[in-house]
Amino acid sequence: MNKIIIILQSVLAIVLLSSFSIQKLETCSLTIEVDELRNSKGTVLFALYNRDDSFPDEYYKKYFKKLTGKIVNGASSVTFENLPEGKYAVNILHDENNDGKIKKGIILPKEGIGFSNFKSIGFSNRPTFAKSSFSLLSDIKIKVKILYL
């Protein structure tokens, strides 16, 4: 009797485990390029965001992932690998003095900044996650304009 119960439990376990399908998460890569940097000093900080409440992030502390790119001939690029499909926004800093922070004048930044989907910024055109975000559903490459204010 014990052998029959063990066999039935084993068969039941196999049936239950085989009925669960393991769903593979799709991952993507995102390549971000910047050019027309005003000089080749410092590095370029690429911050990637996936939540509305984290963007914009003036102090670069709420990012999902962050990479630093070297500058070669006034341009830089990085690739974020193994990203889950979803909505993302990009915030970039031409960190000329390599301190990881935006160097500011009285109000405006003295170093170059950039946001996905933005060619210019101003008081009436400020970056938000809704305006800057894009859907990542496959491997893509985007170009972001660096703005010097």
Image (spheres, rainbow, N blue to C red):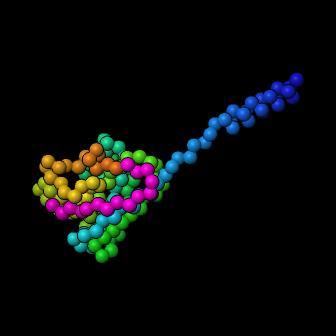
Residue 23, by quadrant, is top right
Residue sitting at x 34%, y 50% = 134
Name the image quarter holding the N terminus. Answer: top right
The quadrant in which residue 130 appears is: top left
Vertical position of residue 108 compared to residue 7: above or below: below
Q: Quadrant of the C terminus?
A: bottom left
**Residue toward you, 138 or 71:** 138
Residue 121 is at least partly visible in this image:
yes
Q: Does the magenta stretch include residue 27?
A: no
Front residue of this view, candidates 139 and 112: 139
- Looking at the image, which is closer to me, 75 or 135? 135
Residue 85 is situated, as x and y percent measured from the top left of the image, at 44, 48
Q: Which residue lies furthest to the left in this view?
A: 106
- Give the residue at x 49% y 52%: 27
User: On the rendered structure, is 112 left or right of 80?
Assistant: left
Q: Which residue lies furthest to the top in this view?
A: 1
The overriding secondary structure of the stretch rendered in magenta is loop
Q: Position of residue 75 (x, y in %)?
A: 30, 70
Residue 103, image x and y in percent? Answer: 20, 60
Which residue is at the far bottom?
Answer: 73
Q: Can residue 93 be seen in this view?
A: no
Q: Position of residue 137 (x, y in %)?
A: 43, 50
Q: Is residue 9 left or right of residue 20?
A: right
Residue drawn at the location 34% of the way across and 55% of the way down: 47
From this view, report whether residue 137 is shown above or below residue 112: above
Which region is colored magenta?
135-149
The residue under the point 26% across, 47% down is 131
Kindly indicate the quadrant of the structure image that contains residue 54.
top left
